[in-house]
């Protein structure tokens, strides 16, 4: 007898830990085969575990943005890239620049090696954007805000509002285009794009004012009074921890500094910063209704991403020629087996995550009103009662 798992939403922090780990793994390689595998894994998990919420459609927008970034990277390489010897693909008219712009090239020979190198670096950006887009499509932003510590609640609200900007704008754009089609107006062309963009901006302003009014009515930013001495100690601990983290990170990247000293600074900075944040939580006046549970699917999701980034980090040190393939001379990149298996392991949330709950009839986490106040759209004809 088989038991069916109950449908529930996965903890949003687990999705973000998984996605950020995959993005960190993408930053450790330029191998197009591994980068394509990471993009495919992110798309597979999104297709298997996304909901019907408006923000779930943002993954496609991130992929489109990544494609645009890749195209711009190739164009800039052809126009301004440093000359790389190799097979000349085509030649652009080269402009002679003044002496104070020495080292900058505009035009000239465009080689296959230069374009391939630009494609590798651009595909890395596409993979990072796909991972962030997957987290944005899978994690409920309002539930993510519940998991933010009280000391970072205000910052968390700003981040959540920023993350919901693209999904909300896409939903409002779809409503406006449907309204224009119902009213017999064209939805294509320069004039239509200009009017639609104006309506989207006006809707964004209305939602911002509504959000500000809702936050003000709910007492957002209210803090518990604390003695001045305790506030100074908390600020000193947090600031000292952040400074130690910055110095430790710089020391870790500096080859002349001992790795043990850098690790000690990082550990000290993390301890001081976490202590300061823990003390700052005392000022936050906030309660959480029905906190999200952390169970074994969340652990599997976060662990799969952590293992992937760990394998990529070790592989970048052990096999740098495979993780960072050369383009001069140009050769087909090799596909390392261990990083590939780690990438396939990152697809575990597609099976381990519980089934998504049905959102039919449920409201969204932020109001999206139809463009009734759009002055660029003509009012529909009113029926005359008999």
Image (tube, helix red, strand yellow):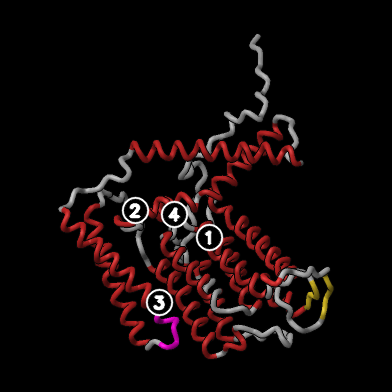
Q: Is residue 277 left or right of residue 59?
A: left
> Residue at label 1?
49
Identify the mark nearer the N-term, 3 or 1. Answer: 1
Identify the mark nearer the N-term, 4 or 1. Answer: 1
Tell me how far mark 2 sits from mark 4, CA to CA. Answer: 10 Å
Say whether marks 1 and 2 touch (CB < 8 Å): no
Q: Which residues are magenta?
A: 250-256
Q: Position of residue 333 (x, y in %)?
A: 68, 84
Identify the mark nearer the N-term, 4 or 3. Answer: 4
Q: Position of residue 113 (x, y in %)?
A: 74, 80
> Residue at label 2?
153
Q: Quadrant of residue 241?
A: bottom left
Q: Position of residue 277 (x, y in %)?
A: 27, 62
Q: Residue at x 84, y 73 (%)?
A: 90
**Residue furthest out toward the top:** 386
Mark whose residue sits in front, 4 or 1: 4
Local crowd size for mark 2, using a 10 Å CA cut-off: few (<14), some (14–19), many (≥20): some
Q: Quadrant of residue 63?
A: bottom right
């Amino acid at each position: 007898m088989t038991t069916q798992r109950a449908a529930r939403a996965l903890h949003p922090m687990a999705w973000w830990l998984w996605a950020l780990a995959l993005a960190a793994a993408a930053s450790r390689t330029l191998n197009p085969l591994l980068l394509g595998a990471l993009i495919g894994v992110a798309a597979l998990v999104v297709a298997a575990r996304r909901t019907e919420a408006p923000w779930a459609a943002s993954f496609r927008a991130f992929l489109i943005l990544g494609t645009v970034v890749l195209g711009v990277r190739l164009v800039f390489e052809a126009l301004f890239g440093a000359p790389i010897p190799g097979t000349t693909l085509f030649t652009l008219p080269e402009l002679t620049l003044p002496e104070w712009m020495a080292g900058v090239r505009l035009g000239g020979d465009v080689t296959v090696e230069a374009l391939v190198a630009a494609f590798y670096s651009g595909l890395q950006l596409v993979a990072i954007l796909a991972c962030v887009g997957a987290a944005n499509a899978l994690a409920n932003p309002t539930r993510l805000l519940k998991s933010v510590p009280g000391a970072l609640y205000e910052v968390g609200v700003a981040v959540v509002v920023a993350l919901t900007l693209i999904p909300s704008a896409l939903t409002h754009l779809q409503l406006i285009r449907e309204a224009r089609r119902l009213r017999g107006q064209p939805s294509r062309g320069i004039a239509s794009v200009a009017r639609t963009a104006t309506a989207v901006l006006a809707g964004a302003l209305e939602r911002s004012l509504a959000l500000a009014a809702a936050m003000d009515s709910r007492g957002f930013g209210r803090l518990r009074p604390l003695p001045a001495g305790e506030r100074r100690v908390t600020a000193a601990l947090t600031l000292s921890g952040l400074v130690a983290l910055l110095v430790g990170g710089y020391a870790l990247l500096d080859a002349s500094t001992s790795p043990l000293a850098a690790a000690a600074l990082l550990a000290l900075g993390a301890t001081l910063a976490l202590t300061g944040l823990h003390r700052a939580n005392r000022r936050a006046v906030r309660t959480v209704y029905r906190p999200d549970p952390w169970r074994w699917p969340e652990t599997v999701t976060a662990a799969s991403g952590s293992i992937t980034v760990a394998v990529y980090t070790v592989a970048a040190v052990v096999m740098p020629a495979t993780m960072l393939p050369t383009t001069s001379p140009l050769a087909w990149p090799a596909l390392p087996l261990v990083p590939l298996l780690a990438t396939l392991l990152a697809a575990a949330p597609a099976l381990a995550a519980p089934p998504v709950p049905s959102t039919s009839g449920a409201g969204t986490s932020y109001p999206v009103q139809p463009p009734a106040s759009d002055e660029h759209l003509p009012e529909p004809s009113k029926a005359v009662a008999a």
